[in-house]
Amino acid sequence: MSTRTLKYVLVLVTFVLSAVTTRDAAAQNTTGTITGRLTDPTGAIVSGAKVTVRNTGTSGSRTLTTDSSGDFTATLLLPGAYMVTAEMQGFKTEVRNGITLQVDQTVRVDMALSIGTMDERIEVNANSLTLDTDSSSIGQVIDQKQVTELPLNGRSFVSLLFLEPGAVQTGGEQSTYRYGAGDAISIGGGVSASNSYTLDGTTITDTSYVTPAFDISVDAVQEFKEQTKTYSAEYGFGANQVNLSTKSGTNSLHGSAFEFIRNTAVDARNYFNVYPQPVAPLKQNQFGYSLGGPILIPHIYNGRNKTFFFANFEGMRIRSQQTVTGYMPTSDELNGIFQTSSFNPNPNATIIDPLTQLPFTTNANGAYVIPSTRFSRLGKLAAAELFAPPNATAAGYNYSTNSPFTVTSNQQTYRIDHVIGPKDSIFGRTTIADVYVLNPALTKYTTSSQNQVTRNYQLTETHIFNPNLLNQVRVGYLEAQVLRLGYQITQADAAALGFSNIFQMPDANYPVLGLSAGLAQTSGSSATQNLSSVAAREPAHGQPATRVGPLRLHLLHAWPPHLQLRL
């Protein structure tokens, strides 16, 4: 059977140097920015004031000082709920609660300070709707509530892409070669090859089919944003950006456990699964858990406000059968008796003996008869093992069967966040995804299997030199392999063909067999696996940041060796 293997190792090192001014806030991928201006009751600017931006989930805080224009900006903030506090001698302390920061969003929090003492405190709960008025980027954020509560067939985050106006599926073969990644998706009229996917700021794009290299569990997704127009020049590799952010632990312990079940009892009969053939069975289970919180080791370590964990596992088991229809040769055809009218509308068609170049003899019914002595060993093996008797008389097929379709999927995501000190924080994430699929077919010899192995690791460190100068380094590793094979040949099959003393290749498989009416055709290719370097086929137009502020350095390595340096 033809094989297609995708295997690559992609190392992405991102260096981000954010020189933040009062007018320019750098929002990097899956982080966000809170900016604002302080004024007094007359509308005059207040410079030199202390501003504290605190994540209410982890208690992590960033302390800033307003500049000569009264402005402050906190960048590289994880999505979540924030509180902003402003303090200045001669003014009351001003607090804004309930500020929701989303992926790649800039939220403006302007405050007018009131005359008084710092001991006096004014608290205001911010509106639940926060508008990004400091960026011209056009996109849509799919928040955590939508991610976890919208019904999804198969629980794939890819389905959520269609919440974006103008996102449609345009066909394609992507899902054939990568199970669960969807087919060709056009966003805003762009070609499907123009989409780029990042997770926590590093790429997870399968550049061969421009799909996600794995379908991360929706229970591990904090939120994600689709950007379609006028986003920052720091983004490259595609016209449409899909930026996902994974969940992180907080000071509170939160978790969930789930199982979703589908089975034959609640599913309708397939249109081609006609009575009296039994209903094709279906058993589908999706199960898993998510858990996050502070790392606590009694009497040893208290990670509150400092060290957090998040863990997620999702498994899927599909044990079903799908109704498959096609053509099987009749008993006459298996014995070498062919009526040309069954496969050729030309009444003068003949079947020529390739040795004599003369027509084969015909029987009393006018059918051509090929002597059994002319059958090859492969033909005899096929007639004995490959074909089943026709069991249907319908337009377009004479055979119908319920063929096994199985999926075994296991996915794990683990993340650790740690606050090293007031100026340093770091997080690491590991995602492991394994998928095995057995595809249905008309006969067991025409089945195909698919084995997907994906490994994704990331390490991100953020350092604050001063309130206006920050540095973030991201190191990401992505390995995605897809191995597609046909029905594996056995020693008994090899012996039946008369082969002896042959080298036994691991995972050797039959060529692709196509069955059609009358004289069937076969096509095949190498039974070995092919190795390809997808990094070498990346779009040439993708460019990282060029604006003042962020500077991104991409080093991409694959096999064969391939190096790209982009500034």
Image: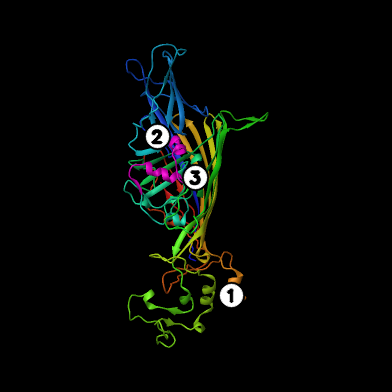
Q: Pointers 2 and 3 in contact (CB under 8 A)?
A: no
- The kind of residue on which mark 2 rests is Gln
Q: Does 153 appear in magenta?
A: yes
Circle 3 or circle 1, nearest the eye: 1
Taking depth in this image into account, of 443 and 258 the one nearest to the observer is 443
The residue identified by callout 3 is 216
Q: Answer with mark 2 or mark 1, whichever residue precedes in sequence.
A: 2
Taking the spot 48% from the left edge, 65% from the top edge, the residue there is 2
Q: Answer with mark 2 or mark 3, whichever residue precedes in sequence.
A: 2
Q: Position of residue 425 (x, y in %)?
A: 53, 34
For residue 27, above or below residue 173: above
The residue identified by callout 1 is 496
- The kind of residue on which mark 1 rests is Ala
Q: Position of residue 281 (x, y in %)?
A: 51, 53
The residue identified by callout 2 is 105
Residue 87 appears in which quarter of the rendering? Answer: top left
Q: Which portion, as a residue range, is magenta? A: 142-168
For residue 499, above or below residue 135: below
Judged from the image, the secondary structure of the residue bearing numbered disc 2 is loop
Q: Answer with mark 3 or mark 1, whichever residue precedes in sequence.
A: 3
- Residue 138 seen in the figure: yes
Residue at the right extreme? 299
Q: Is residue 500 left or right of residue 335?
A: right
Circle 2 or circle 1, nearest the eye: 1
